[in-house]
Amino acid sequence: MTELKNWIEQRGISEVECLIPDMNGVVRGKVLPAAKLLQSERDGTLRLPSSVFAVTVTGEYADATDDDEAYQDPDMVLKPDANTLCVAPGFKTPTAYVFADAYHTDGSPWASSPRQVLKSILDLYKAKGWRPVVAPELEFYLTALNPDPDLPLTPPAGRSGRAETSPQPYGLEALNEYEDLIEAIYEYSEAAGLHVDTMIHESGTAQLEINFLHGDPVLLSDQVLLFKRIVRQVALKHGVYGTFMAKPMENQPGSAMHLHISLVNEADDLNLFADDAGADTPMFRHFVGGLQKYLPQVAPLFAPNVNSFRRMRPSHSAPINVQWGYDNRSCGLRVPISDRNNRRIENRLPGADANPYLAITAALICGYLGMEEKVEPSAQAVGNAYHFARTLPKTLEEALERFNACEPVRDLLGLYFFRAFTTIKEAELEAFQGVISSWERDHLLLKV
């Protein structure tokens, strides 16, 4: 409490946005005068209806019909995490962001909170004396304004007045087309204390990628959500959209959220994925084996939307299987060239649309099970991994069927979270299946 109060007073903060990430990684919560936040935190009256974790991406509620608690919609007690306090850039009134965790009135964590679920999986590692370290790489597109959702997205004009018409991977001139916007993103990110590193131009038209410095999985998830918010705000101020859809344009590559994951010993900070000679440890191999065995079963956690699966196509810069190999970007699981201290696995499966808490949770659960079960990975893929059979689901419907059948992961996630998450995803799938697309009107209306 003292830390929260001192931080706010030292910076002259007038308002605070109390942030609660929902199942889809959409930021919800409350805006409070700073004094009200401090008072509410002090007397335990900072609360929010628990239905915030039952909201679909369309804004509807997806309550289970046999869940009495869903109809009661009890309040959750919110506890701001002082470690996440940061200045909220771009506001006229001095404003701060703070993430809050949700609890029952008896002090137990709210089981369907994605932030709490990730923390519970980290506790499994902590009990073993291990600490996971992650570094996300997040891709996104800038597009022209698009007020009519029936029309396809198009690239925006850069400062030259022209829009990109061809791929410009790593192009510096292409990057400079959006120099003012990019500088504003960096300025906002610095003001918010985000640990962002390199930005590059990716393969798609007006597609960019930002790298985050490695660190704690929960805090990095917080930063990913804040960065998304910053990009959208800055883009709108520059007359364009910033989108993290997995596949926003049909003839362009999708956008990913690659996760670099390593594991260190809490006692001495030594990397547990490589030995003194720099060779892969059995623990590393089992972690990779667990990813290979279980990631295809838990796709909704890292590919949560119907659009997510449009990205996972051969030759579209996205994996279709969980082959692994050294410095091979056609693999779903890539081992970057590194020394002993930096040995890690790059999970290339998650899309940019994924909830970062749940995408990281998925990888850590699968790796944990692999180490517990001592799962041996397949032989490393040599050459083009797209030549191997597809092992990832092709649709959200197929993904949910596999997810529902994966008991080891369900046991670690907890039945309460599992039911809440699947209820939301099934409601979203049903809503999508009720939509008649422009493709159907184009090709079926006057032909069949």
Image (cartoon, rainbow, N blue to C red):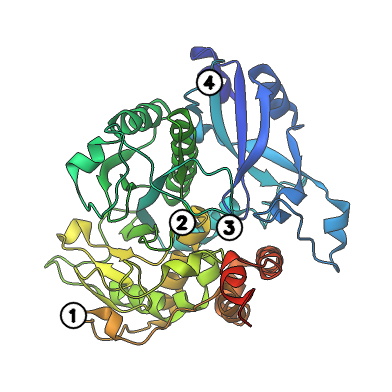
Residue at 60% from the left image edge and 15% from the top image edge: 14
Around disc 1, counting alpha carbons within 10 Å, would you say few (fewer than 14), some (14 to 19), or many (20 or more)?
few
Q: Work out whether mark 2 precedes mark 1 in sequence or the reverse, and give the earlier one.
A: 2
Residue at 42% from the left image edge and 81% from the top image edge: 293
What x and y, as percent, mark residue 389? 36, 87
CA gap, disc 2 to disc 3? 29 Å
Q: Quadrant of residue 27?
A: top right
Around disc 2, counting alpha carbons within 10 Å, would you say few (fewer than 14), some (14 to 19), or many (20 or more)?
many
- What residue does disc 4 label? 91
Q: Work out whether mark 4 precedes mark 3 in sequence or the reverse, and give the earlier one.
A: 4
Q: Quadrant of residue 190?
A: top left
- Look at the image and tell me in which quarter the C terminus lies: bottom right
What x and y, as percent, mark residue 404? 63, 78
Left or right for 77, reference 389: right
- What residue does disc 1 label? 383
- What residue does disc 3 label? 117
- Look at the image and tell me in which quarter the N terminus lies: top right
Say which of marks 2 and 1 sits in front.
2
What is the three-letter code of the residue carrying label 2?
Pro
The residue at the far left in this view is: 277
What is the three-letter code of the residue carrying label 4?
Phe
CA gap, disc 2 to disc 1? 29 Å
CA gap, disc 2 to disc 4? 29 Å
What is the three-letter code of the residue carrying label 3?
Val
Say which of marks 2 and 3 sits in front.
2
What x and y, as percent, mark residue 130? 38, 60
- Checking the image for residue 140, the label placed there is none
Residue at 35% from the left image edge and 31% from the top image edge: 181
Verify CB contact (< 8 Å) between mark 2 and mark 1. Answer: no
- Checking the image for residue 248, the label placed there is 2
